[in-house]
Amino acid sequence: MVEVPDAVLEELAGPVAAAMPLVVARVPPAPAAELGRLRAISDDMWRVRGSAVGDRAGAQLRSGGRPGAGDSPVRDALGSLPPLLIERLLGALELTVPELDLVGVPDLAGLLEEPFSGSFGVVRMSGTSEAVNAAAMLDRVRPGAVLLVAALARRLATHPRVAALLAVGLEITDEPGVAAAHGAAQLALAVSTAAAVLHGVGVQPWATQPPAVLGVAIGTAVLLLRETPMPPGYAAAVLAKVREEYLLPRRSSGRAAVSGHRFALLEEGGSPMSTSEATGWSRSFRAVR
């Protein structure tokens, strides 16, 4: 675990908070919502159709992500996402990274070990995203820089200036809107932190280019979004969305000989009667899609 002095965190919070709104404004709603649902998927809250992450990677996310580099949770988290989602985020934000104002970022090189001075090899698969390749390369060239981004982002999320920017406005009540706002805010924190750290630890110039910054940032955002509870009101937004998508049969019929029992159509668990009533038990049916 990287130990970050409080003074460094305080000095870094200003530039990161200043950069976050620009990133949020550039994140498209659909991929932002895909990211924003990660915790809901892991908590099995997500029951609405149409999520690429839910369809492809729900089991991976619930189990903590697929095996990857093994020693880099950020890279493993990045690799757990659908490739198209990574490419959409890279395309949306690659022109934004050079625009971020990093004035005031402190020198962070002292938080890392000495730069790597030997040789190394990296195996790349054809068609792999630039963001994935650049994050892997950076993890070899500057040991600890990727983990420093994640450590600082976690700490910054609790800083008052940054925490205020992570909150989802109460005026947003629809499920896609809540998920997108949540995902975009956490991604903006990760992008701003990654850009600040990689400019402040003395890495080679290619490692501060958009593919490397965004590869590390997206992986970091996945970690943050898995760890952070869904915003208040998200459960109600999901329930409203599920109600919109109820598929009820046009016609149904059947017979049931019932005496002393109660049957109920319920959206969630629980019984309309207690087991202490006349028959000693109860039964309920849930509405299903």
Image (cartoon, grey):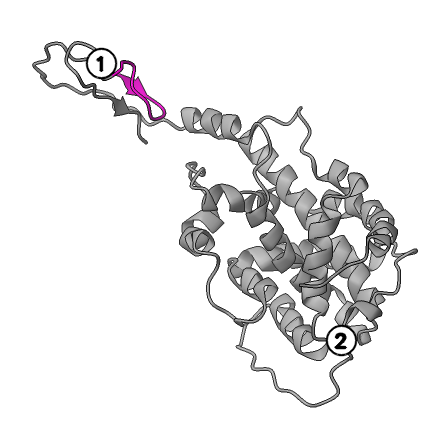
| Mark 1 or 2, closer to the camera | 1
- Measured as percent of width and height from the top left, residue 235 is found at 50, 30
**In the rendered view, does 63 fall on the left or right side of 224?**
left
Query: Are the two marked residues, 1 and 2, in contact with CB atoms closer than 8 angstroms?
Result: no
At numbered mark 2, what does the secondary structure look like: helix, strand or loop? loop
The quarter in which the N terminus is drawn is bottom right
Q: Residues within 10 Å of mark 2 (few under 14, many from 20)?
A: few
> In the picture shown, does residue 141 fall above or below 132?
below
Amino acid tagged 1? Ser
The quarter in which the C terminus is drawn is top left
Amino acid tagged 2? Glu
Q: Residue furthest right?
A: 104
Along the line of sight, which residue is nearer the eye, 48 or 115?
115
Q: Tell me which residue sits at (64%, 66%) in the image.
A: 131
Along the line of sight, which residue is nearer the eye, 211 or 13?
13
The overriding secondary structure of the stretch rendered in magenta is: loop
Q: Is residue 72 visible?
A: yes
At numbered mark 1, what does the secondary structure look like: helix, strand or loop? loop
Q: Tell me which residue sits at (48%, 59%) in the image.
A: 65
- In magenta stretch: residue 126: no
* Magenta range: 264-274
Measured in 3D between alpha carbons, the distance from the residue under mark 1 to the one under mark 2, in whole angstroms, is 66 Å
Q: Is residue 211 visible?
A: no
The residue identified by callout 2 is 113
- Measured as percent of width and height from the top left, residue 42 is found at 46, 46
**In the rendered view, does 257 fall on the left or right side of 41?**
left
Along the line of sight, which residue is nearer the eye, 25 or 81?
81
> In the picture shown, does residue 236 fall above or below 96?
above
Residue 276 image label: 1
Residue 243: quadrant of the picture: top left
**In the rendered view, does 266 fall on the left or right side of 131?**
left
